[in-house]
Image: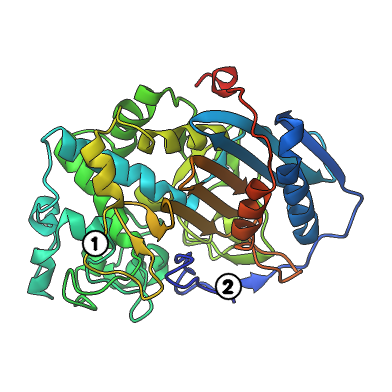
């Protein structure tokens, strides 16, 4: 079975009611290593790290972008494939999975900054959620959702974003289930905790934030985000992803997983590649649905480097310490994981779905990077979270850092 990640590495979830079956690995062929994009000789430690990491895990496609003091200094695509007709590059689109959450949080902060929304606004009356099963649901605020303290704990109950068959059976609705179905179903249950009292990573909470954005603006979630968060900083390539492989974007990579599962897109009962139908990516829009290139998400990180799209007050609020801090010293701010270190703050977010493993890091010393993989599992059993430490080590090995800025080369 696919394993779920703990709170520190963030939940990826497994489709409730779906049996994850390990598919027979394809026959090994002759793979070719190719690298695309731009870098500098001093940044060779990053190329070396990606090559050894990907080859050990047989990862076909990856992309990496590195920022130094606001300048894009590396923009790469990495390919370890038998089929060289598709080559990942710096602008290739990858599913972001939970790296979508900082994008949603930034949109919420923009609404708050513009005076259109309050962090203390209660979510249930805004979205018409029934509080009959638990009156405490009426106390859940926008801030609670941003910080994952809304009261839902999937380790103790379930993650409704991966419960398609149970929702279908309970509500007697057809597949695919909708976000409205998910809200109706989840509101039938009591919260696992009183709002504001316990940190528990919640995909569902961020799905609700997407609905809040739609309710406040009168626009589809992605339209507001593209018009008010992405376009103002020059990001034009990002779009919401689709579940079915036939709906893949022209510049989007394919995704690899060793597992299959029952489709949640219809009632056929067909066994499908897990990454192409055993979960509903469309429903995950605000918490896990975006497609992006590494260079575009590298540009996104610069929103938090200096006032611009967000004011200095909003940026500080994004990383401010909440009431609940993990015993290890890290905490979840507004869309970002945060760890105080000597010299400042390290902030980051990762993402994981079958066929996807992603990581975005902003380091205290002005370095940032985004790495995107088209795979999160393989027969080697090696961890994919290991890339975090390895990229810190690669960064520490660089000297001197280039002074060039490649953002303009990619329309940013």
Disc 1 element: loop
Way the structure is coloured? rainbow
Question: Residue 277, which numbered label?
Answer: none
Q: Circle 2 sits on which residue?
A: 2
Q: Position of residue 19 (x, y in %)?
A: 56, 74
Residue displayed at 33% across by 44% down = 104
What is the crowding at mark 2: few (fewer than 14 residues within 10 Å), some, or many (at least 20)? Answer: some
Q: Give whichever of 19, 232 is nearer the camera.
A: 232
For the N terminus, which image quadrant? bottom right
Kindly give the residue lying farthest to the right in the view shown: 30
Q: Position of residue 229 (x, y in %)?
A: 33, 31
Q: Circle 1 sits on which residue?
A: 322
Q: Are marks 2 and 1 in contact (CB under 8 Å)?
A: no
Residue displayed at 48% across by 64% down = 12
Disc 2 element: loop
Asked whether, in this view, residue 35 is left or right of residue 136, the answer is right
Seen in the picture, residue 242 relative to 266 is either above or below; the reply is above
What is the crowding at mark 1: few (fewer than 14 residues within 10 Å), some, or many (at least 20)? Answer: few
Q: Give whichever of 152, 85 is nearer the camera.
A: 152
Specify whether residue 93 is in view. Answer: yes
Seen in the picture, residue 306 relative to 325 is either above or below; the reply is above
Seen in the picture, residue 248 relative to 308 is either above or below; the reply is below
């Amino acid at each position: 079975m696919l394993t779920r990640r703990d709170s520190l590495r963030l939940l990826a979830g497994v489709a409730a009611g779906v049996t994850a079956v390990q598919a027979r690995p394809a026959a090994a062929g002759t793979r070719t290593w190719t690298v695309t994009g731009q870098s500098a000789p001093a940044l060779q430690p990053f190329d070396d790290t990606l090559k050894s990491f990907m080859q050990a895990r047989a990862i076909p496609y990856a992309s990496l972008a590195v920022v130094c003091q606001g300048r894009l200094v590396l923009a790469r695509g990495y390919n370890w494939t038998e089929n060289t007709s598709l080559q990942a590059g710096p602008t290739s689109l990858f599913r972001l999975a939970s790296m979508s959450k900082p994008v949603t949080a930034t949109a919420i902060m923009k609404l708050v900054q513009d005076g259109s929304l309050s962090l203390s606004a209660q979510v249930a009356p805004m979205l018409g959620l029934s509080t009959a099963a638990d009156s405490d649901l009426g106390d859940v605020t926008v801030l609670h959702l941003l910080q994952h303290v809304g009261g839902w704990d999937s380790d103790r109950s379930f993650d409704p974003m991966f419960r398609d068959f149970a929702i279908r059976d309970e509500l007697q609705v057809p597949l695919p289930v909708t976000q409205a179905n998910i809200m109706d179903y989840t509101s039938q249950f009591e919260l696992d905790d009183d709002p504001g009292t316990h940190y528990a990573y919640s995909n569902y909470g961020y799905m609700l934030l997407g609905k809040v954005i739609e309710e406040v603006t009168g626009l589809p979630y992605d339209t507001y985000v593209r018009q008010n968060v992405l376009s103002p900083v020059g990001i034009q390539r990002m779009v919401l992803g689709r579940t079915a492989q036939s709906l893949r974007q022209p510049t989007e990579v394919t995704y690899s997983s060793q597992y299959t599962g029952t489709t949640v897109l219809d009632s056929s009962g067909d066994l499908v590649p897990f990454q192409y139908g055993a979960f509903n990516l469309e429903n995950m829009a605000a918490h896990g649905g975006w497609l992006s290139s590494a260079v575009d998400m590298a540009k996104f990180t610069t929103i938090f480097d200096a006032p611009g799209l967000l004011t200095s007050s909003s940026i500080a609020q994004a990383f401010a310490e909440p009431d609940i801090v993990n015993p290890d010293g890290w905490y979840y701010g507004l869309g970002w994981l945060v760890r105080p270190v000597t010299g400042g703050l390290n902030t980051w977010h990762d993402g994981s779905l079958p066929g996807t493993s992603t990581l975005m890091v902003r380091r205290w010393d002005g370095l940032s990077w985004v790495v995107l993989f088209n795979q999160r599992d393989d027969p080697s059993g090696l961890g994919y979270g290991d890339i975090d430490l390895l990229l810190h080590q690669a960064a520490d090995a660089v000297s001197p850092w280039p002074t060039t800025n490649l953002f303009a080369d990619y329309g940013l």
